Image: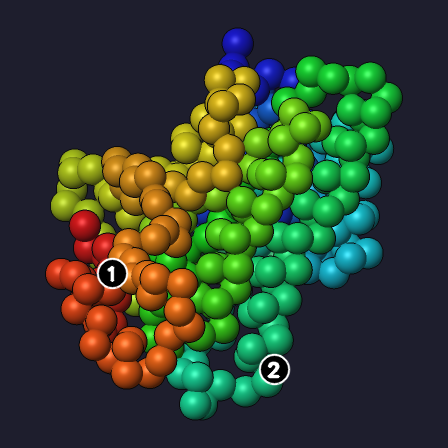
Amino acid sequence: MGSLDGKAVLVTGAGRGIGREEARLLAAEGAHVVVNDLDTDQAKAVVDEITAAGGTALADGEDVSTWPGAEAAVGRVVAELGRLDVLVNNAGIIRDAMSFSITEEQWDAVVQVHLKGHLAPSHFAGRHWRERSKAGHSHQRGRIVNTVSESGLYGLAGQVNYATAKAGIASMTIVLARELAKYGVTVNAIAPRARTRMTETVLGSLTPEPGAFDEWDPANVAPVVAWLAGDGTDAITGQVLVVFGDKVHLMNGWDRCGRIDNDRRRWTVEDLSGRVDELFGDRPTGLPVTGFGE
Ligand SMILES: NC(=O)c1ccc[n+]([C@@H]2O[C@H](COP(=O)([O-])OP(=O)(O)OC[C@H]3O[C@@H](n4cnc5c(N)ncnc54)[C@H](O)[C@@H]3O)[C@@H](O)[C@H]2O)c1
């Protein structure tokens, strides 16, 4: 018996990298997985791996960053498997550039694949869960697991398109969690770190010592997704978890960390200039500290 026996799952961008490992583990845990990837040959290869290992999967080549593509991908899960239980939004691309060098095309492509590529499948999945709830399936356990990045949480230079889109997905996660709670759906996000095609140019040489734990293996990310997808996480929603190797960090979002009050009078520039120390306390007034490397 697996922890996800019989669940109907859609993983986007699952033809390689982190998504491939997620699809394989979810299937090994008993889920029926639709392996989506624009690269259909890759999606089919993952389906073959899953079937060879005794699992159930089928391939889908829709572009989930378009409304019709997302509708078709979610519709396919429902048509083939009878319903959707788990949506893993994972598909992604990078087109790195500094804000002063970036082209409109680099901006649009990345924002579309990540932001719309997360919202569009979530929109159609949410519609499905709302309809099921109205039809009397009051105990359904819908799950969305989004994929963000520490680049977006900390703001990495050279990735203005990617980081902005990923930060948007972190916000989207909270909105969707609030909107879908009443239909029994939880929505969380992971921020993974792994050696994949996306990161190989930077991390390619990071091969583990023989016999040592390979913290960059993309397969390290999948158990967290399988756990979030399961029945034991009803109470966990609207959260962002950084997942790297054997570490899982719970992230705290935007939060108030300093305050000044002008005693029911509108601020003047002079007032504000004189209260900087009080507002910032011990915190840096310059670039925010990042958690990379921890
Ligand atoms: N690798 C890391 O360290 C890392 C770090 C932070 C976040 N992420 C995120 O994890 C996710 C997976 O990244 P990866 O490293 O496995 O990358 P990858 O390039 O190995 O895999 C991404 C897959 O998504 C597919 N894809 C792209 N656009 C698509 C679309 N519109 N519709 C369907 N499929 C599409 C690609 O064909 C590819 O197979 C991405 O969202 C990425 O931003 C990765």
Q: Residue at x 68, y 28 (%)?
A: 182
Q: Give the x, y percent position of residue 215.
A: 25, 43
Question: Relative to 12, is 204 on the left or the right?
Answer: left
Q: Which mark is residue 21?
A: none
Q: Quadrant of residue 261?
A: bottom left
Question: Closer to the camera, 282 or 32?
Answer: 282
**Amino acid type of disc 1?**
Thr
Q: Residue at x 35, y 45 (%)?
A: 252
- Asked if the residue at label 1 sits under 8 Å from ligand 1, the reply is no
Instruction: Check disc 2: other Cα within 10 Å, few if <14, some if 14-19, many if 20+.
Output: few
Would you say residue 62 is visible in this rendering? no
Which element type, helix, strand or loop, lies under badge 1?
A: loop
Residue 146, relative to residue 230: is it above or below?
below
Which element type, helix, strand or loop, lies under badge 2?
A: helix
Instruction: Check disc 1: other Cα within 10 Å, few if <14, some if 14-19, many if 20+.
Output: few
Q: Residue at x 66, y 53 (%)?
A: 119
In contact (CB < 8 Å): disc 1 and disc 2: no
Question: Closer to the camera, 29 or 254?
Answer: 254
Q: Give the x, y percent position of residue 68.
A: 82, 56
**Amino acid type of disc 2?**
Glu
Question: Relative to 85, is 280 on the left or the right?
Answer: left
Q: Quick one: label 1 or label 2, which is nearer the N terminus? A: 2
Which residue in the structure is indicated by mark 1? 290
Q: Which mark is residue 105?
A: 2
Would you say residue 161 is visible in this rendering? yes
Q: Give the x, y percent position of residue 225.
A: 47, 34
Q: CA distance from mark 1 to mark 2?
A: 29 Å
Q: Give the x, y percent position of residue 106.
A: 55, 79
Residue 273, relative to residue 65: is it above or below?
below
Q: Residue at x 82, y 17 (%)?
A: 136
